[in-house]
Amino acid sequence: MITEAVGLACDKCWHCGDKRARSIIVEKDNGWVLHSGLPKTASLDAHIEALLSKLDPFKESIRFISLADTVELSIVIYAPSPPALNFDSSIINQLTELGASMDIDLYILGE
């Protein structure tokens, strides 16, 4: 449904009630995932900028969806030590234009 509404294919999606692969967890919400396309070693800013560039041509459709549903940039970071989490105002402005919030999950793995 999101793919059709936005006009952009995703990298992964699921529906409420789907069972998560290799687990007993049942999804409570629908999900639609788009990856930046960059290697995992790229900087956080580079990942966000690449993703926002992919979304830019579809921002009106995404903004429309955000009026009724949650649009969120979800970031998961696995790092040996806490990284800097400083975002340029242009990133914040672009998220605002999309009607999106940001969620960051940070996992410190140690050296």
Image (cartoon, rainbow, N blue to C red):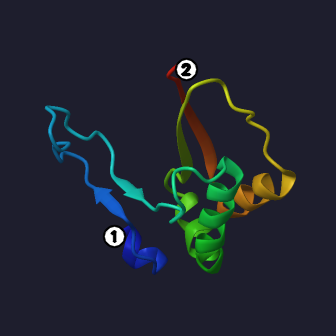
Query: What amino acid is at disc 1?
Result: Met
Instruction: Residue 77 in the image: state x and y as whole percent.
Output: 54, 36
Mark 1 or mark 2, whichever is nearer to me: 2
Can you tell which mark lies on residue 50?
A: none
Q: Residue furthest right?
A: 89
Report the front residue among 24 and 71: 24
- Would you say 64 lies left or right of 19 here? right
Query: Could you give the CA–CA distance between mark 1 and mark 2, rounded to whole angstroms?
Result: 42 Å
* Residues at circles 1 and 2 in contact by the CB criterion of under 8 Å: no
Please, which residue is most extreme toward the front here? 111
User: Is 31 located above or below residue 111 in the figure?
Assistant: below
Q: Amino acid at mark 2?
A: Glu
Picture disc at residue 1: 1
SS class of the residue under badge 2? loop
Location of the C terminus by quadrant is top right
Q: Is residue 33 left or right of residue 1?
A: right
> Mark 1: which secondary structure?
loop
Location of residue 51 in the rendering, given as x and y in whole percent from the top left corner: 59, 64
Which residue is drawn at the image coordinates 69% and 31% (left, top)?
83
Disc 2 crowd, CA 10 A, few/some/many (<14, 14-19, 20+): few
Mark 1 crowdedness (10 Å alpha carbons): few <14, some 14-19, many ≥20: few
Quarter of the rendering occupied by the N terminus: bottom left
Residue that badge 2 annotates: 111
Please state the horizontal and vertical placement of residue 70, each as a whole percent of the image.
51, 50
Residue at left offset 29%, top offset 39%: 28
Residue 79, how many percent across, how many down? Answer: 56, 31
Please tell me which of labels 1 and 2 falls first in the chain. Answer: 1
Residue 60 versus residue 83 in the image, above or below: below
Left or right? Give the position of 45 relative to 42: right
**Quarter where residue 33 is shown:** bottom left
Q: Residue at x 13, y 32 (%)?
A: 24
